[in-house]
Image (cartoon, rainbow, N blue to C red):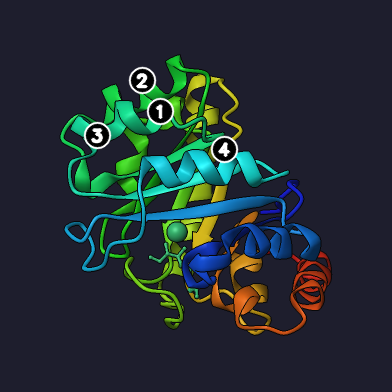
Amino acid sequence: MESLKKLKIEASILNADYLHLGDEIKRAVDAGADFIHLDVMDGNFVPEITFGQTMIKHIIKHSDIPVHAHLMIQNTDEQLPSYIKTGADLIIIHAESSRQMYRCLQLIKNNNIKAGLALNPATPISYIENVLELLDYILIMTVEPGFGGQLLIESMLLKIKNALRIIEEYGKKTGKIISCDIGVDGGINEQTIKKVVNAGANIIILGTALYNSNEPAKVVSNIRKTAENTLII
Ligand code: DX5
Ligand code: ZN
């Protein structure tokens, strides 16, 4: 299957210098990132804590590009309304942390925010079937969430392909065209980009590949070039 969507890059600030966040965000923008990706961690859904609603609001003020909030929190159903108020352009919530996913996605959409659904590696891709009509974005976790700098789990490549298949089948069965982005989060770098683009991902999250580099613009442009030259099969 050929992906018609242009590759977009999200800069995850998880491994940035938090005491100089304004500069770090500028670094990602100057490097050519399309979006800022904020990893919200609550020390419960994942072991560590990063930041929450207040910090997101501040970051949005300092970012010239759209901000996506990836909520790795235990109690999505209860906390979602306060994240909706932050002004994030897209909110990604986890299948494993919501008891009422349909309602949560509806709430995001009703507030004119793009809705994303993230799936941990062991969560079956079939989960998307019953909420597909509400999704703008599916985030396939290509590592267990919680930390930057991990290795991409190769079996997630098949999961990306299966997501595209489900979207295509849904379109055929219902006559509705679903324009849903497929993002991949974790372990993406100049070595692994080809594999995920080949599988069908059109949004990639870059954490350590970007922030551990002295030449982030070069990383972004190399990744874009590789993606453009990658034939999707
Ligand atoms: C992991 C986070 C990722 C992480 C990616 O839980 O959701 O966004 O920052 O980092 P890298 O690119 O280093 O795998
Ligand atoms: Zn993330």
Q: Amino acid at mark 4?
A: Cys
Q: Earlier in the sequence, mark 4 or mark 3?
A: 3
Which circle, 2 or 1, is nearer the viewer? 1
Q: Amino acid at mark 2?
A: Leu
* Up/down of 70 relative to 107, above or below: below
Q: Residue 156, image x and y in percent?
A: 42, 68
Query: Of marks 2 and 3, which one's residue comes earlier in the chain?
Result: 3
Q: Which residue position is annotated with label 1?
A: 84
The image shows residue 146 at horizontal and vertical percentages of 32, 68
Residue sitting at 25 percent across and 49 percent down? Answer: 73
Q: Which residue is the site of mark 3? A: 79
Contact between marks 4 and 1 (CB within 8 A): the answer is: no
Q: Residue furthest front?
A: 19
Marks 1 and 3, Cα distance to the nearest angstrom?
9 Å
* Element marked by disc 2: helix
Q: Which quarter of the frame holds ligand 2? A: bottom left
Residue at x 36% of width, y 73% of height: 147
Q: In the rendered image, which quarter contains the N terminus?
A: bottom right
Give the residue type at disc 3. Answer: Gln
Indicate the quadrant containing the C terminus: top left, top right, bottom left or bottom right: bottom right
Mark positioned earlier in the residue sequence (1 or 3): 3
Q: Give the amino acid type for the residue marked by disc 1 in the picture.
A: Ile
